[in-house]
Image (tube, grey):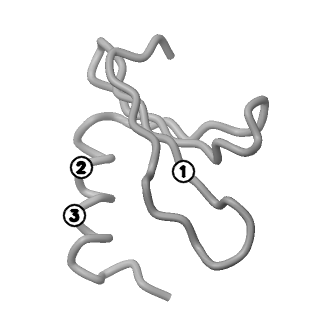
Amino acid sequence: MRARLSVKSSYRGGVGSDCAEVAVGGDGTAGGRDSKVVPGPLLSASGEAFAAFLDGVQHGRLDC
């Protein structure tokens, strides 16, 4: 995915430097990855699906 906008989380957990990075592509897709594992897996979704995911996180519907 060629990123139009890339944002790295400013929140860091207790141990180590846990960090997530999110990018939005020019075609409206969104992707996320663990910034500590650069060649690692990338989660990619349509803009609508990613917006629904973020809404679920913000409203506590995805908390474990």
Can you give x and y, in whole percent of width and height, for residue 38 in the image?
Answer: 73, 33
In this view, the mark in front (1 or 3): 1
Can you give x and y, in whole percent of width and height, for residue 60 in the image?
Answer: 29, 83
Please state which of residues 20 and 56 is positioned toward the viewer in this rendering.
Answer: 20
The residue carrying pointer 3 sits among few (fewer than 14), some (14 to 19) or many (20 or more) residues within 10 Å by Cα, namely few
Query: Which residue is drawn at the image coordinates 64% and 61% (left, top)?
Result: 18
Q: Amino acid at mark 1?
A: Ala
Please indicate whether residue 24 sits to the left or right of residue 51 in the image. right
Query: Which residue is drawn at the image coordinates 27% and 35% (left, top)?
Result: 47
Name the residue carrying label 2.
51
Q: Amino acid at mark 2?
A: Ala
Q: Which mark is residue 20?
A: 1
Q: Is 59 located above or below residue 51 in the figure?
A: below
Please state which of residues 48 and 40 is positioned toward the viewer in this rendering.
Answer: 40
Q: Amino acid at mark 3?
A: Asp
Query: Which residue is drawn at the image coordinates 54% and 50% (left, top)?
Result: 20
Classify mark 1: helix, strand or loop: strand
Disc 2 from disc 1: Cα separation: 16 Å
Q: Which mark is residue 55?
A: 3
The mark that comes first in sequence, 1 or 3, is 1
